[in-house]
Amino acid sequence: MQIKINCEKPYSVFINELDTIELNSKVAIVTNDRVAPLHLEDFLKRLKVKEYGVIIVKDGEKYKNFETLNYILDECFKLKLDRKSYLIALGGGVIGDMTGFGASIYQRGIEFIQVPTTLLSMVDASVGGKTGINNKYGKNLIGSFWQPKVVYCQTDFLQTLPKREFSAGVAEIVKMAVTFDKDFFEWLEINSLYEEENLQYAIKKSIQIKADVVSKDEREAGIRAVLNYGHTFCHVIENETEYRRYLHGEAVSIGMNMANRLALKLGLLKNEELKRVEKLLKSYDLPISYKVNSSEKFYESFMLDKKSFNKKVKFILPDSIGGFSMRDDIEKSLVLSVLDEFND
C-alpha cells in the first residue's frame, strides 16, 4: 500500500512493500544497539547501494542529545559521505528524529530514508519531517523540518517488539482517533490491535490521518499542532522524569488524560467520553496517572513548550470524541486545578 504525502517535497509511505532499496550512492544506516541485533542483518540483504556503512548508537530517549548527534555526524565524515549520499534511519522514533536532524545539517542537507521498526514510529514519528534532539530544557527543542525521501513501514518488524513498546505506539493511534475521527475511535473500542489484520488497518488509518494533516500544514502553522494533543503535558512529564521512567507513548497517554480533564472542566468533553478514552488506554496497559509534586512548577514548564508564545500556553483539547479545540486563553487557575487533581 502507498500513501502519498503532498508537501513542498512530496514523498510516499509504503506499507509492507519493502523489497529492496536500490541507490547509486553511498549510504549510512543509523540504528541502535537494540535494533541492530534483531533487524540489521535482514535489512542489509534488502540493500543494493554503491557503498554503505553502519552507525550504531545507544538505545533510549536519554541518548537523544547533542553528544549522540555529534557522534552520528563524525561517523558520516569518516565514511566520506557526500551531498549525494543518503542516511537511512532503521529504528524507532528516537533514531528517526536524530537521523533526520543529522541529514538536515550534514553538508547543509542530504536525503534520508525512514525505516521505522516500532509501532509508534510507523504511525507517527516517521511521517511528517519533524526532526530534532532533546536538551535539559525540554523535548525536541532543537531541530528542523526535513522531510524524508521515502518511508517504508514493515509490520514484520513488530514481531520482536516488546508489549510495552507496542502499547506506547497504540497511544499515538488513540491520539489521532480522539481528535480527528470518531468512527475510527469507535472501531478501536471493539477491535483488538493484537490481531494482525486489525493492526494493519489501524496503521494505515493513522498514517492517512497524519498524511492529510501534514499535507495541509507542513510546518505546523495551524492544524498540524492538533497532532500534539496530550504532548504539552507529556513533554513536562518526560523532562521531569529525565526520559527514564516512561516511554514516549506512555507519557502521551498520561498527557491525554490530563488534557481530557481540562477539556471536561471547559465543557468540551463529557465525563462519559473521558471515561471511554481512559478505558481504551487502560485496555493496552497504558498509564493515565502521574504524581505532580508542584502544580506551579509544572505549569511554568509549559513556557518552554514550542507551542507557547508571548507567555500564553496553547493547549490542544478534544472537543467531543472526533473533534478538537486549540486554546491559548485558558486561565492559569483552571489549569492548576487540573494539575492539583494529580497531586495525590
Image: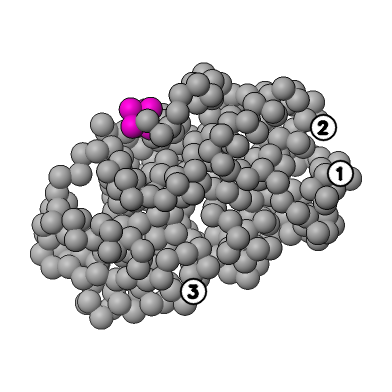
Q: Quadrant of the N terminus?
A: top left
In the rendering, at what x and y percent does residue 105 appear?
39, 67
Is 50 positioned to the left or the right of 96 in the image? Answer: left
Q: Secondary structure at mark 3?
A: helix
The mark that comes first in sequence, 1 or 2, is 2
Residue labelled with disc 2:
265
Q: Quadrant of residue 197?
A: top left
In the rendering, at what x and y percent does residue 256 appear?
65, 40
CB atoms of marks 3 and 2 within 8 Å: no
Is 104 positioned to the left or the right of 258 in the image? Answer: left
Q: Residue at x 46, y 24 (%)?
A: 191
Categorize mark 2 by other alpha carbons within 10 Å: few (<14), some (14-19), many (20+). Answer: some
Residue labelled with disc 3:
66
Looking at the rendered structure, the kind of residue marked 1 is Ser
The stretch of residues the image draws in magenta is 196-201
Q: Residue at x 46, y 50 (%)?
A: 165
Looking at the rendered structure, the kind of residue marked 2 is Lys
Q: Residue at x 76, y 36 (%)?
A: 261
Residue labelled with disc 1:
337
In the rendering, at what x and y percent does residue 183 appear?
52, 18
